[in-house]
Amino acid sequence: MVTPLHDAAIALLQENLTAVADLVVGLGDDLAARRPDLPGANAPYGIANHCVGLVEFWLGSVVGGERIPRDRDGEFTATGRVADVAARLTELADRVPGWVRIALEEGPRDRTAVGSTRTAAVREASAEWMLLHVVRELSQHLGQLEITRDLLTSSADG
């Protein structure tokens, strides 16, 4: 079912996933592994990895019914090569249209999925809410990544 929400959700989800991948790749492995000198700050790699986890959880597990295992706390402390997390983000962007279709035509397939602090939303929220929630979270984390990049690159230059 192609509706304005369908098209908007796909466009915004893919745009955010691509922007997160591009940003972390632009930093390279060294800077992406660094945390800004702020209490509780996350490294760009961890933020990007969390974006993978949140999309896999809400769209893959809850909407798609795929039961993708999630370690939410571990997402932020993960390390690795930016090429790997960027490839995962790109793969997720490619899968977005199918998940949006499932959300809007069938509704969530697995309301018992575990891996979010929003357990009531998993059980009760509409598919539309879930799509908008993922757009919101990705946008928020993209902004966090942009600020983190600016902090890291300004301290690396100085």
Image (tube, rainbow, N blue to C red):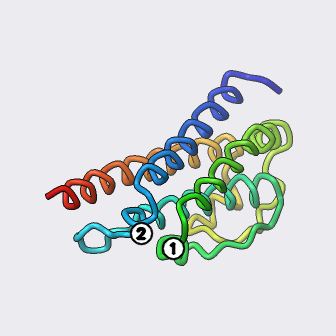
Residue that carries the numbered disc 2 in the rendered image: 33
Identify which residue, 36 or 50, lies in the foreground. Answer: 36
Query: Where the C terminus falls, by quadrant?
Result: bottom left
Label 2 SS: loop
Q: Position of residue 34 (x, y in %)?
A: 35, 69
Q: Position of residue 59 (x, y in %)?
A: 71, 52
> Which sits earlier in the primary sequence, circle 1 or circle 2?
2
Circle 1 Cα neighbour tier, 10 Å, few/some/many (<14 / 14–19 / ≥20): some
The label on residue 130 is: none
| Picture mark count | 2
Q: What residue appears at the point 63 percent right and 58 percent down from the top-left corner?
A: 121
User: Vertical placement of 124 versus 45: above or below?
Assistant: above
Q: What residue appears at the point 67 percent right and 22 percent down from the top-left corner?
A: 4
Q: Amino acid at mark 2?
A: Ala
Q: Are marks 1 and 2 in contact (CB under 8 Å)?
A: yes
Q: Position of residue 135 (x, y in %)?
A: 55, 43
Residue 123 picture quarter: bottom right
Q: Position of residue 53 (x, y in %)?
A: 62, 63
Query: Where the N terminus falls, by quadrant?
Result: top right
Q: What residue appears at the point 44 percent right and 53 percent down from the top-left corner?
A: 141
154 relative to 119 in the view: left or right: left
Q: What residue appears at the point 57 percent right and 34 percent down from the top-left corner?
A: 12
Q: Amino acid at mark 1?
A: Thr
Identify which residue, 123 or 45, lies in the foreground. Answer: 45
Label 1 SS: loop
CA–CA distance between discs 1 and 2?
7 Å
User: Vertical placement of 15 versus 56: above or below?
Assistant: above
The label on residue 79 is: 1
Circle 2 Cα neighbour tier, 10 Å, few/some/many (<14 / 14–19 / ≥20): many
User: Vertical placement of 117 versus 143: above or below?
Assistant: below
